[in-house]
Image: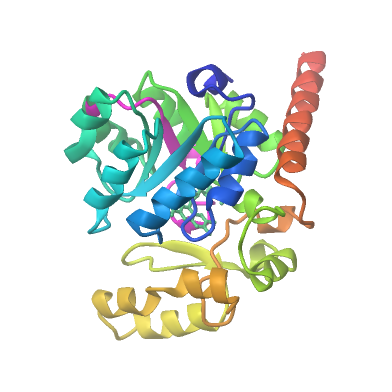
Amino acid sequence: MNLEKLLGIKYPIIQGGMAHIATSELAAAVSEAGGLGVIGSGGMSAEDLRDNIRDLRAKTKKPFAVNLMMLRPDTDDLVKVILEEDVKILTIGAGSYGKYADIFKEKEIKVIPVIASPVQIKRYEDYNPTAYIAEGMEAGGHIGQMTTITLIPEAVNATDRPIIAAGGIASGREIFAAEILGASGVQIGTGFLFTEECPAHENYKNILLKSTSSKVTVIGNNNVPMRLLKNKMTRDYKNLEKSNSLEELEYFTIGRLRKAVKEGDVVEGSVMTGLDVGRFNEIVPVKEFIERIFREYDEVKNGYKNQG
Ligand SMILES: Cc1cc2nc3c(=O)[nH]c(=O)nc-3n(C[C@H](O)[C@H](O)[C@H](O)COP(=O)(O)O)c2cc1C
């Protein structure tokens, strides 16, 4: 894998920029452990973002990124903070960053858009992104239609830029599988929910610890699909889907992730998680998690070479 050199990190792993969860605490721990920590600006005001960037820099000198969700109406304010604070790497979710492509280029900011289909790569190529995160629908949170195993090879064929695999990566085995499919690194979200430095409410972590893939569902298939745990909220949503408009449904989901993550309401809140939730059964420090999966990766890769 060759993401390490490109981003100045020890292990080719990016932590998902999860709204309300990827604070400076989690991101600093990931960067300090040798991955790329990402501050998720979804759910943060511009000033919260500035505080998180400064707090992260007080905790680690290693590279980090900020995740920007482009559909937010206050994106200009967030971009202003990113430029003022001299952030050097961005991951981009939910929408195009075309409006800012020139200024990011001028400031030599490395930009890594998240894509869920190869068609999106065509749209971004002119902006000269550094790499792409190709996220399969196994992932937690908002998702596309393709699986990781179908998306990665297509994405690799669609561009000369590095592809970072996301969605369902739980151990060294999947990291090696992603490499075989042509990926240069991985992004993990769900796995980092099972870490000590993840600031999610203990109710969120406890219910994840008890869950397996059979407890995971997708809502919003007619609108913006989202993967999360089954609970009262998802049942209510599916009932509303039969009669309510898309706007009403969208309104219904607003603030639900915050409710679960901050208030610990795992009944009415959105408990976003990937399909690999059942692969994790303990809460460990970030450093231990990263070192373990790359030890597994080395073991699997060496075993594969020896077989050959
Ligand atoms: C709770 C949660 C919140 C997320 N929020 C965001 C977000 O704000 N922006 C984003 O680009 N991706 C978001 N994601 C997706 C992750 O960044 C990552 O791509 C995904 O979790 C990878 O798949 P995995 O969950 O199977 O590891 C979120 C994922 C989860 C589980």
Q: Would you say 161 lies left or right of 235 here?
A: left
Instruction: Give coordinates of residue 45: x percent, y percent.
Output: 35, 59
Instruction: Give coordinates of residue 246: x percent, y percent.
Output: 26, 74
Q: Is residue 213 above or below residue 36?
A: below
Q: Would you say 93 lies left or right of 1 here?
A: left
Q: Is residue 151 one of those drawn in magenta? A: no
Q: In terms of image quadrants, where is residue 243?
A: bottom left
**Residue at coordinates 26% horizontally, 44% vertically from top-left?**
80
Q: Is residue 133 one of those drawn in magenta? A: yes
Query: Where does the N terminus fall, quadrant-wise?
Result: top right
Which contiguous range is marked in magenta?
127-150
Name the image colouring: rainbow
How many numbered discs sit on the rendered protein?
0
Q: Is residue 133 above or below residue 301?
A: below
Residue 261 in sight here? yes
Query: Where does the C terminus fall, quadrant-wise?
Result: top right
Q: Is residue 89 above or below residue 166?
A: above
**Residue at coordinates 72% horizontally, 69% vertically from top-left?**
206
Q: Would you say 72 lies left or right of 173 here?
A: left
**Residue at coordinates 66% horizontally, 37% vertically from top-left?**
174
In depth, the one of 260 and 167 nearer the eye is: 260
Residue 136 in sight here? no
Instruction: Give coordinates of residue 118: x percent, y percent.
Output: 34, 35
In depth, the one of 227 and 16 nearer the eye is: 16
Instruction: Give coordinates of residue 22: x percent, y percent.
Output: 53, 52
**Residue at coordinates 28% horizontally, 26% vertically from top-left?**
107
Q: In terms of image quadrants, where is residue 212?
A: bottom right
